[in-house]
Image (cartoon, rainbow, N blue to C red):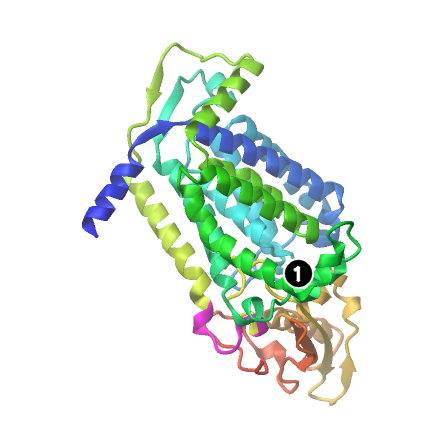
Amino acid sequence: MGMAIKNLFKYLNTNCSIATLVVFRIAFGALMFFSTCRFILKGWVHSMYILPKMHFPYYGFEWVKALPPTGMYIVFSLLLISSLGILFGAFYRISSILFFLLFTYVELIDKTNYLNHYYFVSLVSFMLIFIPAAKSFSLDNKIFKRSETIEIPKFYIFILQFQLFLVYFFAGIAKINYDWLMEAQPLKIWLPAFSHYAVIGDFMEKEWVAYLFCWFGCSYDLVIGFLLFNKRTVNIAYVFVLVFHLATALFFNIGMFPYVMITITIIFFKEDLHLKIVNYLKKLFVYKVVSGSTFTINQFSKGLTIVFSLYFIIQITLPFRYLLYNGKLFWTEQGYRFSWRVMLVEKAGTAFFYVEDKETKQITEVDNKEYLTYMQEKMMATQPDMMVDYAKFLKQEFIEKGYSDPSIRAQSFVTLNGSGSQEFIDPTVDLSAESNCFLKNKEWVRSY
């Protein structure tokens, strides 16, 4: 064990070309700029952060609030500027910090909008803060008249590769469950919706195709990281990456996730390719080294080793936190987020909320549409922690309307992976008195 750790540190301290980091920085910056433009142009700043009367906060981050409309558009404008800063390596460290803080702030406002690839972007932008990706082919080198760095320790590339490996591997582990492997769910429900496609449409209604997709998807996620790390198999592995993610983009509405993964995964390619790309770009933009000298970063610091050791310990243990809770994970969703569980469930439901004035015993049924957007209501109806948030919001609303210490109860029915509608929560529980503390099991969620 000791020898293995020693060899790992020796490998991480080995120098390699900085070109790999430069290409990664350019690709990530370009993706984030395009993605932010798309977000603004589609009107999602308004529909997700300005239009809602309430937001669903993450536990412990209730203090994070949306800004007024002008403030939100300033935030997204700064995201555009900072993504360009990353892309061109201009004021890189400040740009990376700004992008990480603003992007994470936006994602913390409302868990209705949680997506795995948003979480992934926050993680990568955090890592970029510590990575010297602008030490070569950057505006910073021009602005500050710095010498070019030609080599960096493999550590800086490895931590990005390992983060990607974890995304794939945990996505594979998450697929090792009865519904996915034995019942081919939820693909058995989703694929027939594509039966109108030319050529392949007829196959989409075949049950064996759903099983094929499920077993291939699980196998792919479990092994692709190992194949990407191996220099002899990285090229064929990338072909699988292209096929897999283009197929998911074709069949499912999962936004930028496939394109993010396709682009970011190029970090596994040999440095020769990245050197050719950087040299081509330098010629294209007539980029000349500021001074005649170059230097090499010889080693990474012990402080950085400690920071990323803790970071990866959290990343490896966090997906398993669901083991602390009772009940079926896909039903209760306790420990579901931040664990790379992608497209694993088809869950739908309805929730009716009732407010009772304890003094007058008057009971009022709530019109959810009065307070929630369509997407918020859809997500809330199947996620217990969001029901608690909504109940606390309703309590304050009705206190302001003159109710004396109102209690909030809900009747909810949910279907999971085509199993049929079942009662979801105990309708006698005052949800406004419940907590979303991660140390407390939600006993009031009915057994599945």
Q: Is residue 168 above or below residue 87?
A: below
Q: Residue furthest top?
A: 292
Instruction: Write down the residue under mark 1.
Output: 55
The answer to whether residue 406 is seen in the rendering is no
- Taking depth in this image into account, of 267 and 81 the one nearest to the observer is 267
Residue 329 is a magenta residue = yes
Q: Answer with left or right where residue 156 lies relative to residue 104.
A: left
Majority SS type along the magenta span: helix
Q: Answer with left or right where residue 143 lies relative to residue 206.
A: left
- Taking depth in this image into account, of 193 and 82 the one nearest to the observer is 193
Q: Answer with left or right where residue 430 lies relative to residue 157.
A: right
- Residue 40 position, x and y percent, is 72, 42
Residue 310 is a magenta residue = no
Q: Residue furthest left?
A: 2
SS type, badge 1: loop
- Residue 140 position, x and y percent, is 48, 22
Residue depicted at 53% across the width and 49% down the height: 120
- Residue 34 position, x and y percent, is 66, 36
Q: Is residue 435 above or below residue 278?
A: below
- Residue 127 position, x and y percent, is 45, 42
Q: Quadrant of residue 321?
A: bottom left
The stretch in magenta equals 322-331
Q: Locate the C terminus and report the quarter of the image it occupies.
A: bottom right
Q: Quadrant of residue 37?
A: top right
Amino acid carrying mark 1 in the image: His
Residue depicted at 52% across the width and 63% down the height: 175
Q: Answer with left or right where residue 435 lies relative to residue 411.
A: left
The answer to whether residue 85 is seen in the rendering is yes
Q: Is residue 191 above or below residue 106?
A: below
- Taking depth in this image into account, of 369 and 421 the one nearest to the observer is 421
Q: Is residue 215 above or below residue 391?
A: above
